[in-house]
Amino acid sequence: MPRARFVSLVLLSVLAAAASAEERPISRLAWLEGRWETARPRLVTQEQWLPPLGNTMMCIGRVVKSDCLVDYEVVIIREHGSRFAYEAHPLGQESATFLSTVVTDSTVIFENLAHDFPQRIGYQRFGADSLVAWVEGPSHGKTKRNEFAYRRVGAHH
């Protein structure tokens, strides 16, 4: 094989590997990246999503009331076969894992019907700077849904 052709094949292989690394399934959720916030008088809820890396996305969420941290949660989303696993690690509670049931360019929904509450967790983006997150499931014989309307804060890539 002539040297120029060999070098070309090696270069194409490297470029193909780099392209496939950039197009990991987790990159479908890159729209979550950034700092999201909902603020009311004396109550601020934030989620900070790190960009996809290592087949995961990570989030730290916190609730601050009157300048005092009252709740926090760490979330890891991992590639899980053809789906995504949402691993929630909330303050003072057992960790729980939910698997994706819906994944689009602007929506992701995770579900774990064996969990008490919530059984579903969802995120839906509206434009570049608006995001609605929700948790949903049974509560006292009815379906309960808590929604969080977030706005992007800080710089956006």
Image (tube, helix red, strand yellow):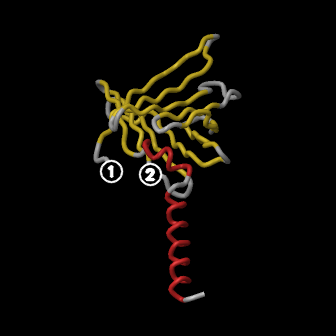
Mark 1 element type: loop
Residue farthest top in this picture:
141
Left or right: 132 as drawn, with respect to 55: left
| Position of residue 99 measured from the top left corner of the image (x, y, whole percent) | 64, 37
- Give the amino acid type for the residue marked by disc 1 in the picture: His
Q: State the mark number for residue 157.
A: 1
Label pair 1/2, CB-CB below 8 angstroms: yes
Q: Real-space Cα distance between discs 1 and 2?
A: 10 Å
The one of 101 and 15 positioned closer to us in this rendering: 15
Numbered circles on residues, count? 2
- Quick one: quadrant of the N terminus? bottom right
Q: Which residue has dot 2 on it?
A: 51
Up-down relation of residue 20 to residue 59 (above or below): below
The one of 82 and 15 positioned closer to us in this rendering: 15
- Give the amino acid type for the residue marked by disc 2 in the picture: Pro
How packed is label 1: few (under 14 Cα within 10 Å), some, or many (20 or more)?
few
Up-down relation of residue 152 to residue 147 (above or below): below
Q: Residue at x 60, y 16 (%)?
A: 139
| Position of residue 98 measured from the top left corner of the image (x, y, whole percent) | 63, 36
| Position of residue 126 measured from the top left corner of the image (x, y, whole percent) | 38, 31
Q: Residue at x 38, y 45 (%)?
A: 34
Up-down relation of residue 119 to residue 61 (above or below): above
Q: Residue at x 44, y 51 (%)?
A: 51
N-terminal label among 1 and 2: 2
Mark 2 element type: loop
Left or right: 74 as drawn, with respect to 129: right
| Position of residue 55 measured from the top left corner of the image (x, y, whole percent) | 56, 54
Q: State the mark number for residue 71.
A: none
